[in-house]
Amino acid sequence: MSKALQSLLDLLDLERIERDIFRGRSRFAVVPRVFGGQVAAQALIAAGRTVPADRFAHSLHAYFLVAGDPGAPIVYEVDRIRDGRSFTTRRVVAVQHGRPIFHLSASFQAYEEGLDHQAPMPEVPDPETLPTFEQMMPRHAEAYASPDMLERMLAARAAVDLRYVNTPPWGSVGEPREPRSQVWFRTAGKLDGPLDDPLMHVCLATYVSDMTLLDSVLLAHGRGGWAVGDVVGASLDHAMWFHRPFRADEWLLYDQESPSASGGRGLGQARIYTQDGRLAISVIQEGVVRVPRES
C-alpha cells in the first residue's frame, strides 16, 4: 500500500465524537477548498457506521452547499431517518464554522435476489497498456495555468492509479470533441486489515467519482478546465447507485458523458464497470462550469 493511499484511508477513518456525530480532517486539493469527493466519501462513511453490518449502500444523493475550508475540521451529523425490514435510510449534514457545507442522503439494503440485467461494457484498451497519470501529465505541462499545477495535480491524485483512455481536456485545448471521457482507476495499492470492507470500497469509489466526471462537459467545447484556467467550476450535486459488488483496489472503468451544458452549469453522467464487464455503479453530477470573462 502506498503512503498516499494510507493517508487517504486515515482521512476516511473518521473520529466518532458521539453516537451519531463524527469528525473528519481534510487533505490537499488542486483548488483551495475541500475536494468534493472527500466530503462525500466522509459523509457516506459516517452514515454507514450507523447502519447494521449486513446492509450495504445502494444509493446516495448529495448537494454541495458551500465551499469547504481545508484548514478546519468537518463535523458530520447523522440523522437516522428510517430502519426498515430491508432498507435503512440516513441523512448526513456536514458542518464547518457553524454552518452546513454539504448534505447527503444515503440508503442501505439487506442483500436479496432479484431480476438482473445491465447495459454492456464498452470496448476499451486494457488499463495496463495505458500510461499512468504520472507519465501522462508532464506531456501537457505547457498548457497548465500555473507553474506548480503539475505538482498539485499529481499530489492530489497520488492515492489513485488513474489512466485516461483518451486525451484529457487539458491535452486538447481548442479542439472540441465528442462529450465522452473514459478513465480506468483503482487505488494505489491493495486494501487489507480492518478497513478492507464493502463500505470502504464504496466510499473510495465515491471519492474518485468526483475527480473526472465533468471532463466530458469540457471536451464538448475544447476547454481544458481548472488545470488550464479557461473555466471556473465546482460540483453542485452528486448521485450514485451501487448495483453490484466491486473492489476499489481492482480496475474499474469510468465511462462518462455529458448530455447537456447551459446556464453556467454542465451535466455529467457515467457508468462504472468492473474489469470483467459487470456494471457496478451509475453516477450523475451537475456542476458549475463558467467561462472567465477574460477568456
Image: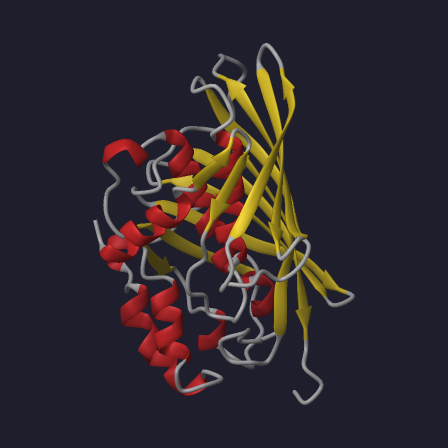
> Does residue 188 appear to the left or right of 232 in the view shown?
left
Image coordinates for residue 76, horizontal then vertical, percent: 56, 42
Image coordinates for residue 214, horizontal then vertical, percent: 57, 60
User: Could you tell me which residue is drawn at 54 percent across and 20 percent down?
Assistant: 109
> Does residue 108 appear to the left or right of 187 in the view shown?
right
Image coordinates for residue 165, horizontal then vertical, percent: 38, 60
Mark yes or no: residue 183 visible: yes
Q: Picture quarter containing residue 197?
A: top left
Mark yes or no: residue 120 visible: no
Q: Picture quarter containing residue 203?
A: top left
User: Could you tell me which residue is drawn at 76 percent across and 64 percent down?
Assistant: 262
Depth order, front residue of 16/2: 16
Residue at the extreme left of the image, as rendered: 1
User: Could you tell me which residue is drawn at 55 percent across and 78 percent down?
Assistant: 175
Residue at the extreme right of the image, as rendered: 263
Residue at the extreme top of the image, as rendered: 85
Q: Quadrant of the C terminus?
A: bottom right
> Does residue 192 appear to the left or right of 226 in the view shown?
left
Residue at the extreme front of the image, as rendered: 18
Depth order, front residue of 290/124: 290
Colour scheme of the rendered structure: secondary structure
Where 169 sits versus 202, above or below? below
Image coordinates for residue 11, horizontal then vertical, percent: 39, 50
Where 294 sits versus 90, above or below? below
Q: How many marks?
A: 0
Where 273 sits versus 151, above or below? above
User: Could you tell me which residue is drawn at 71 percent across and 85 percent down?
Assistant: 293
Depth order, front residue of 31/225: 31
